[in-house]
Image: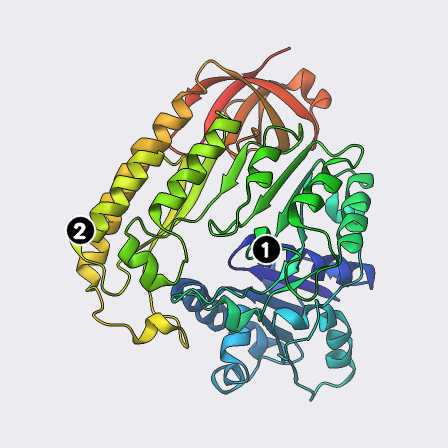
Amino acid sequence: MKFFIRTFGCQMNVADSFWISSSLVSKGFDMTYQEEEADIILVNTCSVRKKPEEKLYSFLGRIYPYFKKNPELIVGVGGCVAQQLGEKIWKKFPFVRLIFGTDGIPYVPQSINRLISTPSLKISLLDFKDFYPERDIIINEKLLSNHPIAYVNIMQGCDNFCAYCIVPYTRGRQKSRHSKKILEECRRLVDAGVKEIMLLGQNVNSYGKDKYGDGVSFEDLLIKVSKIPGLKRIRFTTSHPKDISDKLIKLFGELDNLCPAIHLPLQAGSNRILKLMGRKYLKEDYLKIIDKLRKVREDIVITTDLIVGFPGEKEEDFRETLDVIKRVEFDSSFSFKYSDRPGTRAEKMEPKVVEEVKSKRLKVLQNIQDELTLKSMNKLYNQTVEVLVEGMSSKQRDETTVSFKGREPGGRIVNFLVNKEIVPTISVGSIVNIKITEIKKHSLFGEVRR
């Protein structure tokens, strides 16, 4: 039987979907990239913002004709929207047979087998566990062959309960994964050819500080992972500014394979709004962290998240956010208009910022960020950078060359051309020296240096 998975949302969702795929392949299922060919269609969802939720409804509406054509088609909905909506999904989309939350993912493969054997059955996997829901470590070298980068979950859930955030309600309270399991998975991935590992958590800085921790801090875990033979690069996400430590900051200057890049969500530059959000830091605290990071690693790439139009945000609050953006000069940012998420404190906060104002502010912010991103990337012009090759680029320039793509240590996309006669010397997972010759809006272009 063939299965198809569509993933919306964050890297954790990508990691969850990859595990499901690996597990199903190990059980004899075939993966297809064509949803119309599938006997099983799974969609893994995100509900941090409203748009991915709308994408789910659109996707389910689009695949309904496949079910009409094949009533034995198994459709499953998982992730944060599934946890949020629960069995309401069945009322709106009765052809869905499997609903699974984030803690239910380890049980998806066996549930699919049950659905196959019992056509009338529907299964709900929405209960939160009182422990980290450990999964079998499945290393499928066939699926990994074109993936030199792997995501490894180190924890589940969050205890921060920021006013706007639905994560504690859809992923549960924080549960740290046992460090030995994390290290075992990382070692096996590297043995299978993975060159870069990204450690994932809602707040990696608080790893090990909950009751499920085993005495290993995030900093200690990072050091242990960095010592795995053959691992070329390490990244992590996401960090919470209130929990980042001086020890972690110093590691950027001490670990050779720790990439000089950090995603540090600011969300707002106004202390009044930060307090309403429940972020538990001031903009002054945030700026001190930035100064420390750049003192340890001058070339560190700093990215962030920003919310525009939080309830009660005034024009002066927005201007304070712009001031911080200009002061930090973020290399890039993910910025969004605030949207109510059900069950959060911010949903009940007033006054709401009208849509027109939110859209106007977002455009102003993003125009400033575009200028800062271009300034950041221009620093690499004529510089030679190490690029981890991720595959061929979709845009091929001519018949005598092949275009590859990859990322430099800061995480920026680099495309480069290779003459066809030397293509066999370039492979997915190799690290190539590239001289940057062109700066694009969101990527870099270069040529191989020998």
Relative to 435, residue 75 above or below: below
Q: State the image quarter where residue 127 is shown.
A: bottom right
Measured as percent of width and height from the top left, residue 358 is found at 23, 57
Residue beneath the point at 54% across and 81% down: 86
Q: Badge 1, how many Cα within 10 Å: few under 14, some, many 20+?
A: many
Measured as percent of width and height from the top left, residue 75 is found at 61, 74
Q: In the image, is 237 to the left or to the right of 110?
A: left
* Residue 285 at least partly seen: yes
Which quarter of the figure is the N terminus placed in? bottom right
Which quarter of the figure is the C terminus placed in? top right
Q: State the image quarter where residue 77 is shown.
A: bottom right
SS under mark 2: helix
* Residue that mark 1 sits on: 206
SS under mark 1: helix
Residue beneath the point at 52% across and 22% down: 398
Of all residues shown, which one is farthest toward the top? 450
Residue beneath the point at 73% across and 55% down: 215
As rendered, which of 225 and 81 lies closer to the eye? 225
Residue beneath the point at 37% across and 32% down: 373
* Residue that mark 2 sits on: 316
Q: In the image, is 100 to the left or to the right of 308?
A: right
